[in-house]
Image (cartoon, rainbow, N blue to C red):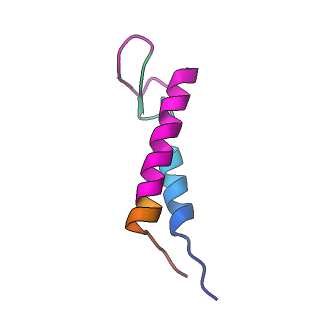
Amino acid sequence: MHTDWGPAAVAVIMFILLSPGMLFQLPARSRVVEFGNLQTSGISILVHAVLYFCIYTILVVAIGIHIRT
């Protein structure tokens, strides 16, 4: 029995990197992009969720990242 950890690993890494305000925030309160401000807004959460979905779909479905144990 093999387990595919690829989708889970991609999801965790992307969740850490794409959390609004952690590395960057798009759109920011005063500028288009701010880096490392650790603040967020509703529109920023929506933009990061759409980015997360698009990048996750590309990595898992189109490229097919698999980590089998």
Q: Residue 25 is drawn in which quadrant?
A: top left
* Residue 62 sits in quarter: bottom left
Give x and y (percent) for residue 66: 47, 73
Q: Is residue 21 above or below residue 41?
A: below
* Residue 50 magenta: yes
Q: Can the viewer see residue 40?
A: no
User: What residue is drawn where x is 53% and y is 55%?
Assistant: 11
- In depth, the one of 54 and 3 nearer the eye is 54
- Residue at 43% across, 69% down: 64
Could one spot residue 13 in this view of the protein? yes
How many marks on residues?
Answer: 0
At 41% from the left and 26% from the top, the residue drawn is 26
Image height of 66 relative to 14, above or below = below
Q: The N terminus is located in which quarter?
A: bottom right
Is 54 situated above or below 45?
below
Magenta stretch?
A: 29-58
Horizontally, residue 35 falls left or right of residue 2, namely: left
Q: Quadrant of the C terminus?
A: bottom right
